[in-house]
Amino acid sequence: MMNYTRVMTLEEVKKLTVEELDFLYNEEDANSIGMLLAHMGAVEKAYQIETFHRELTEEDINELNPALDLGNKAREQINGNSIDFYIKELADIRQQTIETFKTLPDEWLFQQSTFWFDEQANNYFKWFHVFEDELNHRGQIRIIKKMIAKQLHV
């Protein structure tokens, strides 16, 4: 499911230019497609740490930002990259995920720990959230592409 989601995400962005990847429909609070792609990678890295190793630390969060939280710093710092940059970053992160999955027993998927709102969640749900997040942002990417078509390619 994760790989299918990724294939479809990459299909959506593979031909975008740097200008299109950096397009902001609003300078105050919009996310660019490049920001969303970087965010997808940061989310996956965060879940690697959280489910394969240990709880996230403040240092981890600082390393994953600004892509993890997005916002003003992301608008300032995540730009000027080609689609090949984002594709390679996403592929490298995914390869680490898949290689680690191969080493874990199926029972690992059902191990529970405290998650959002101090509720229990298993690893299966946590990793479902990784590609659920990507699916949601792919929807945003499609909307942004429509805005790009109207504003940049009139």
Image: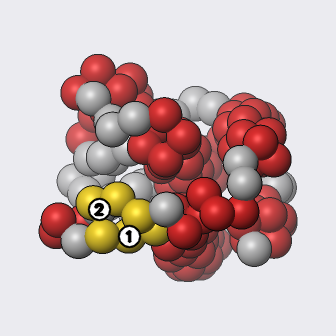
Residue at numbered disc 2: 115
The answer, for residue 12, to whether it is visible in the render is no
Query: Which residue does the image show at 54% across and 40% down from the upper left?
Result: 52
Residue in the image at 60% along x and 57% along y: 108
Residue for badge 1: 121
- Coloration mode: secondary structure
Residue count near mark 2 (Cα–Cα under 10 Å), binned few <14, some 14–19, many ≥20: few
The image quadrant of residue 118 is bottom left
Q: Where is residue 59 in the image (x, y as percent from the top left)?
A: 29, 21
Frontmost residue, 122 versus 97: 122
Disc 2, SS: loop
- Looking at marks 2 and 1 on the same chain, the residue that comes earlier in the sequence is marked by 2
**Residue at 40% across / 56% down in the picture?**
31
Report the quarter where the N terminus lies: bottom right
**Hey, what amino acid is under mark 1?**
Ala
Percent position of residue 113, x then y: 35, 59
In the depicted structure, whether residue 17 falls above or below residue 65: below
Pick the front one: 127 or 72:
127
Q: Can residue 85 be seen in this view?
A: yes
Which amino acid does the dot numbered 2 rest on?
A: Phe
Give the farthest residue toward the left. Answer: 117
User: What percent of the width, then of the height, locates residue 55?
Assistant: 33, 38
